[in-house]
Amino acid sequence: MGTGVEVQAVDLDETGWLLDADTREPVPHHGLRDYFADRLAPPPWATDVLVYVHGWQTSPRSARRTAERLLALLRANLAAHPAQYPALTDATAKGFRPWCVVVRWPSSSAVTPAGYRRIRDRAHAMGARDGGGHAAHILGRLLGYLDTERADPRAAPVLANRDGQYLHLVGHSFGCRFLCEAVQWAADARLEDTLGWSAAERSPSRPFTADSMLLFQMAARRDAFLTRFPGILPGDGHDGAPLRGPIVTTYSRHDRATGFWHLRAERQAGIGHSGIGPAPAPMFTTRLLPVDERYPLSVLDHRFVNVDASEVYVRGRRLNPAGAHSDHVRPESAHLLLTLADCSR
């Protein structure tokens, strides 16, 4: 599927700022672009760039391993069911050779309701732009850098074409919040906040454009897209988040972390348990399909898509009170991600 290293990692501190992989010290603001260029230039063999942000209770090693497992599932699905992804396997296409950037952050706590609230509060503090959090700013700049550096960046206004590389955002649990904050940051970013990513014909509020966004078991209130991420869609003074495709979220009634625990902490179930609730645009709800069943375009071609994974995400470690919260690394999940990549062509 490609040559060279398929997974690269970046690390954030408790404020959401980027850490140097060698020194473990914060990268100076003026050195961000050079650091990205040195460590994160998309390889020329890659057709698709994936940015994966992990969730609660994930060590740095586990985050990388999860990304590697997901890539292995993508390869296996594509090899076993090529007809499901015609745009990826067409003789005239360049295929699907993903390269993944894993964004790691300090997410460990006691596996208790208090521990869940602690990481919830940390995730909010890291991502919130009205306080001392930097995650949205750093991720936004990272995504903008990747968007600029992917092949043929000026070939089309949305930077997605058969000659270029596609950019996909994938989050899990609290990591979904960081991605939403990052794309919302991009919706109202000032031109001087970017790294010169915006071409002259593009809006200053769109320093990057992503081709798909897949959020596994999101740890946020069901009304989060109304209350916490109102800038995702176009509004007064901004063009909305730079997303070409839909915002797709999975949920499972077997996810106790975003069910029982989230209910106690937030007084309502989370998206990962019950799906998106009130939203600023119409939603479509479907189920997570088996790998041998194709998603019709009409199912995914909506601004918000709820995917019920309750028949698939059922497993949790023995005695783990989080339930199936982390049961998303499945062939069916890879099938959904491959379909989004296929529809992006």
Image (spheres, rainbow, N blue to C red):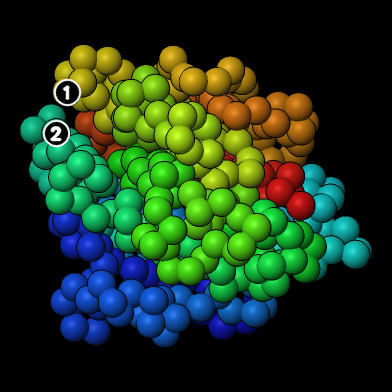
- Where does the image place residue 270, in percent across and percent down from the top left? 33, 24
Q: How many badges with numbers are in the image?
A: 2
Numbered disc 2: secondary structure: helix
Q: Quadrant of residue 283?
A: top right
Which residue sits furthest right? Answer: 91
First along the sequence among labels 1 and 2: 2
Amino acid bearing label 1: Ala
Q: For this view, does 196 lie left or right of residue 29?
A: right
Crowdedness of circle 2 by 10 Å Cα count: few (<14), some, many (20+)?
some
Dot 1 alpha-carbon crowd within 10 angstroms: few under 14, some 14 to 19, many 20 or more: some
The residue shown at (70%, 72%) is 152
Q: Nearer the viewer, residue 39 or 324?
A: 39
In the figure, is residue 164 to the left or right of 269?
right
Q: Residue at x 67, y 78 (%)?
A: 45
Query: Looking at the picture, does residue 67 appear above or below residue 228?
Result: below
Question: Closest to the observer: 292 or 343?
Answer: 343
Residue placed under numbered mark 1 in the picture: 265
- The kind of secondary structure element at disc 1 is helix
Q: What type is the residue that disc 2 sits on?
A: Arg
Is residue 64 in view?
yes
Residues at circles 1 and 2 in contact by the CB criterion of under 8 Å:
yes
Identified at 16% across, 45% down, the residue is 131
Q: Which residue is mark 2?
A: 117
**What residue lies at 8% left-to-right and 33% top-to-bottom?**
114
